[in-house]
Image (cartoon, helix red, strand yellow):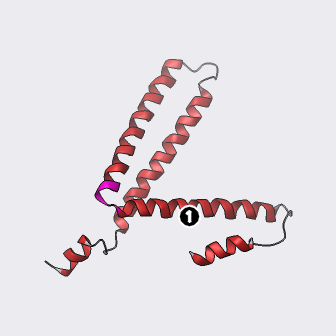
Amino acid sequence: MTIQALLKKLQLLGDEPLRQQYLEIIARQTALNRVLQHLEQVEQRPGIEPEFCDYQEALIKGELERLEAEIERLQDEYPNMRDFTLEQLRSELLAIEADTYAEFVRSGRLNRELAPSLEQVIDKS
């Protein structure tokens, strides 16, 4: 057994291409969910045939199911993807919190750059 094979087996080799592929699937899933939400809003517009919306909705839902299966496959094959998913979610939540705080600072409601609790979280990252 080579060192590279051992490192791969122990999941110590960089998996940046795998993470990139995984993130692309997540991005596609997020985009299609947004498209689906928009489609539900425009269904009520005059001049839009319900059959067209139904067909588009079926296509989108089919693709979402395929993407979900692909995500599950990757998570089963590479258990570290579950940790990566949680890491990504944590980053997203932190970004939402930081953006919200920045919104208050920009509007003049707060005069500090970051909340002390947010600074502690960022320092730990």
69 relative position to 55: left or right? left
Q: Which one is in front, 116 or 19? A: 116
Look at 13% across and 77% down and name the residue there.
1
Quadrant (top left, top right, bottom left, bottom right) of the C terminus = bottom right
Q: Is residue 78 magenta?
A: yes
Q: Nearer the viewer, residue 17 or 121?
A: 121
Q: Which residue is mark 1?
A: 91
The three-letter code of the residue at mark 1 reads Ser
Image coordinates for residue 39, horizontal then vertical, percent:
56, 31
| Secondary structure found at label 1 | helix
Residue 86, how many percent across, how many down? 48, 60
Residue 78 spot, x, y in % from top left? 31, 60
Q: Residue furthest bottom?
A: 3
Residue name at image x 47 percent, y 29 percent: 57
Q: Is residue 29 within the magenta segment? A: no
Magenta stretch? 75-79
